[in-house]
Image: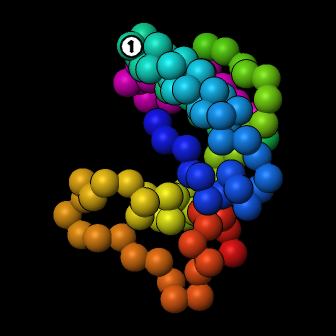
Amino acid sequence: MYVNEAECEKAGLSEKEVEKIAKGLSRYALMAKKLGLGIFGGSGSGTLRYSDDSDSGPLIVAGLDGDFDGGDGAELIDVLAQLPQTFPAPITQPEDDDGLAREG
């Protein structure tokens, strides 16, 4: 878990408030993982899903309140570039990027 200080500042958000939310969500995500659950977001809705490896897909065990943007993950390239490098190849940003982790 980390807080992107530059983007908090750009958005006019308190880093402490963002950190509190991020820590809580991370804590619950780890609890879900221990139960074999994944958090899925898409089209504004969120669900907890359990994959039982059947051909019928994961079981949707709960619906979540709030806004969950599943997206395609493209915006994560900038976020991952700020994390310690654990990947085989470095992640680069386009030259015209302003350094913020958001879609174009």
Q: Quadrant of the C terminus?
A: bottom right
Is 72 on the left-hand or right-hand side of 34?
right
Q: Tell me what residue is drawn at x 41 percent, y 64 percent.
A: 81
Image quarter of residue 46: top right
Q: Measuring from the top left, give residue 50's x and y in whole percent.
A: 49, 19
**Front position in the image: 37 or 12:** 12
Q: Tell me what residue is drawn at x 43 percent, y 60 percent.
A: 82
**Front position in the image: 60 or 100:** 100
Q: Mark 1 is on which residue type?
A: Lys
Name the residue at the left extreme.
88
Which portion, as a residue range, is magenta? 45-60
Residue 80 seen in this snapshot: yes
Is 103 on the left-hand or right-hand side of 94?
right
**Front position in the image: 47 or 89:** 89
Q: Let me know if residue 1 is in the magenta part.
A: no
Is 84 on the left-hand or right-hand side of 71?
left
Q: Measuring from the top left, give residue 19's x and y in whole percent.
A: 60, 34
Identify whether 75 is placed above or below 24. below
Q: Measuring from the top left, give residue 91's x and y in whole percent.
A: 36, 70
Identify whether 70 is placed above or below 10. above
- Which color scheme does this rendered protein use? rainbow
Is 67 on the left-hand or right-hand side of 90?
right
Q: Tell me what residue is drawn at x 79 percent, y 53 percent.
A: 12
Image quarter of residue 92: bottom left
Q: Measuring from the top left, give residue 102's x and y in whole percent.
A: 65, 64
Q: Let me know if residue 56 is in the magenta part.
A: yes
Badge 1 marks a residue whose secondary structure is helix
Identify whether 95 is placed above or below 50. below
Q: According to the image, label 1 marks what residue?
A: 34
Q: Tell me what residue is drawn at x 59 percent, y 21 percent.
A: 24
Mark 1 closeness class: few <14, some 14–19, many ≥20 residues within 10 Å = few
Residue 25 seen in this snapshot: no
